[in-house]
Image: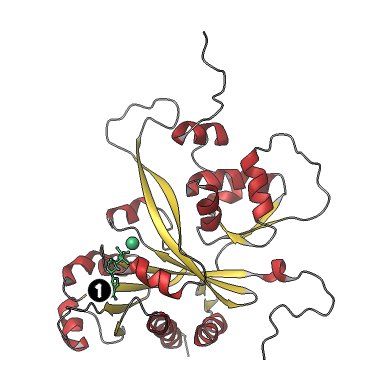
Amino acid sequence: MSAPRRPTDPTGLERYYVLTGGRSKPAGPAATLDVATLVVSRTGPQPSPQPGLQHEHEEILRRCREPLSVAELGAHLGLPFNIIAVLLADLLEAGRVETRDPVPANSAGLGPDLALLEEVLSGLQRL
Amino acid sequence: MDFKGFDPTGRTTAADGTRSVKVMIAGGFGTGKTTMVRSVSDIRPLTTEETLTQASAGVDHLIGVTDKQQTTVSLDFGKIGINDELVLYLFGTPGQERFWFLWNGLFKGALGAVVLVDTRRLASSFRAIEEMERQNVPFVIALNVFPDSRDHPVEEIRDALDIPEDIPVVAFDARDRAASRDVLVALIRHLQERAVALEPR
Ligand SMILES: Nc1nc2c(ncn2[C@@H]2O[C@H](COP(=O)(O)OP(=O)(O)O)[C@@H](O)[C@H]2O)c(=O)[nH]1
Ligand SMILES: [Mg+2]
């Protein structure tokens, strides 16, 4: 009896290894993803099913019709941040998602974003 | 007036402009980080994990992902809809501060942090305060008042923790939504004051 070429129900590290093709870190633009980065699926006609996309890629696309953070994706899919980031790298490369990093209080060279702080403050005061 | 969801053209516009900001909730183990996130969040708090790789000295370079020390660290988080196009994410930092070093960029891009302090165990938040200072993350101190906490004057705690005058120290109950919201308001006001003070004139 020979071992299955690919486990049918991989768990833990094995499952991650299969999902990511052994990549433990995302490459390219996905390397700077943050837990609070918003992910939105790109709309428009897409070949479906697309070759090379795993079930988890499709799941991300489905959940991100409305913007969703990387942290939420991780929680909903039960996958750690770095694995989600690798899957997002694939989707970014395929042009299937857009990502938007959290807005910092200071953007380099521009100084403190007072308008943003005011916006957050008035939102909190309405709670 | 609330125009939430009002769109005369019937298009779905929500997706397009939405932005996010993040605030970190730090502090020692059991100081009430998860409780505070739960109190103010619009959603039931969720947990996201990160697999951190600790490069242990002298490890051979083998192939694959299992050759290094893997540690799983959890972040509790929640979110608050600020308006139709802005979402505030709150992240409760992992209990063991030593993992904060390993998680690159955990605090990067955060507006600031709330450092929770249990006044019965001041020392449990020392590391968190030091880390905020070291990583240049602006913060406020929030004293989480437990039923058997002694009635400590805020200024006494400020001295004990060696917190400079310009950093707010407030007391609150992490189980209370309005009180937790007010701590976030105190943080944003502090960020505004800092911004004005830093701005070249
Ligand atoms: N009485 C009281 N208990 C609290 C308060 N905040 C947290 N707790 C309790 O203290 C324990 C630790 O809180 P938790 O939020 O899990 O702390 P964390 O480790 O910082 O996330 C839990 O059992 C909470 O129910 C508070 O303001 N008052
Ligand atoms: Mg906790």
Q: Residue under label 1, please give it.
A: B117
Q: B49 and B131: which one is in front?
A: B49
Percent position of residue B140, x then y: 33, 79
Q: With respect to residue A62, does A15 lie above or below? A: above
Q: With respect to residue B26, does A72 lie above or below? A: above
For this view, does B127 lie left or right of residue A96? left
For this view, does B53 lie left or right of residue A45? left
In the picture as drawn, the residue positioned furthest to the top comes out as A1
Image quarter where the N terminus of chain B lies is: bottom right
- Do we see residue A90 in this rendering? no
Q: With respect to residue A64, does B145 lie above or below? A: below
Q: A95 and B176: which one is in front?
A: B176
Classify mark 1: residues with Cα within 10 Å, few (<14), some (14-19) or many (20+).
Answer: many
For this view, does B193 lie left or right of residue A90? left
Percent position of residue B175, x then y: 35, 76
- Classify mark 1 as within 8 Å of ligand 1 or not, answering yes or no: no
Q: Quadrant of ligand 1?
A: bottom left
Residue drawn at (25%, 73%), measured in percent from left and top? B117
Amino acid bearing label 1 = Val
